[in-house]
Amino acid sequence: QLMNINSALADIDQLLIPSTINNFINLRFVMSKERDIINIFGECDARALNYLISHVKVGLLFYKVKDHRNFSGQHRTELIQLLCVDRLVILTVMSRVIILHALQLMKLRANQRAEYWVRNILLNTHQD
C-alpha cells in the first residue's frame, strides 16, 4: 500500500511539469491517482493506516492532492475529512500529530473547514 501511494504521488507530482499544468493536461489521470490514494487510506485497517501516515509525506500529499473545480473532484477536502474525522478514532497520538503538522504546512487558511478539522483532532485526542 505504501508503494502504491508513493507511486500515485509520484505520478501526480511530476518532476519536470508544474502541477498546475499537469492538472490541466492530465486531469482525468491525476484525478484517478488522487482517488486511488483516498481509497487506500479509506480501506486499510488501523495498523496499516498508522504505518502509512508515519511513512508517507503527508504534508506533500495534502499539497499535491487538489480540490478540483467540479463537485466530484473535491479530493483534498475528502482526504483530510477522512483522516481528521472519519478515521480519527483509529489513529494513534503520533499519527494525529503528523496530520496536524501536515495541516500546518498546508496553511490552514487554504480550506474553510480546516479549523473544524484541527479542533476535532485536538478535542478527541487522549492518551494512547
Image (cartoon, rainbow, N blue to C red):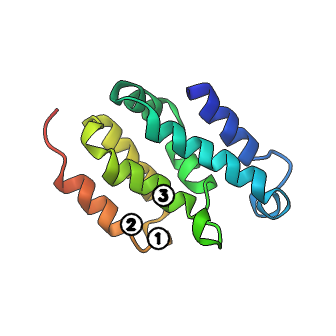
User: Which mark is first along the chain, 1 or 3?
Assistant: 3
| Image quarter of the N terminus | top right
Q: Position of residue 124 (x, y in %)?
A: 18, 51
Which structural element holds mark 3? helix
Dot 2 amino acid type: Ala
Label 3 and label 1: CA atoms lie apart by 12 Å
Dot 3 amino acid type: Glu
* Residue at the farthest left position: 127
Mark 2 touching mark 1, by CB under 8 A? yes
Rendered image quadrant of residue 94: top left
**Residue found 42% across the figure and 74% down from its top:** 112
**Residue found 65% across the figure and 73% down from its top:** 69
Rendered image quadrant of residue 8: top right
Query: Which numbered dot is residue 70?
Result: none
- Along the horizontal axis of the image, is 36 left or right of 91? right
Closer to us: 48 or 57: 48
Query: Which numbered dot is residue 114?
Result: 2
| Residue highlighted by disc 1 | 111
Which structural element holds mark 2? helix
- Along the horizontal axis of the image, is 13 left or right of 66? right
**Residue found 53% across the figure and 35% down from its top:** 56
Q: Is residue 38 above or below residue 27?
A: above
Closer to us: 86 or 125: 86
Label 2 and label 1: CA atoms lie apart by 5 Å
Which structural element holds mark 1? loop
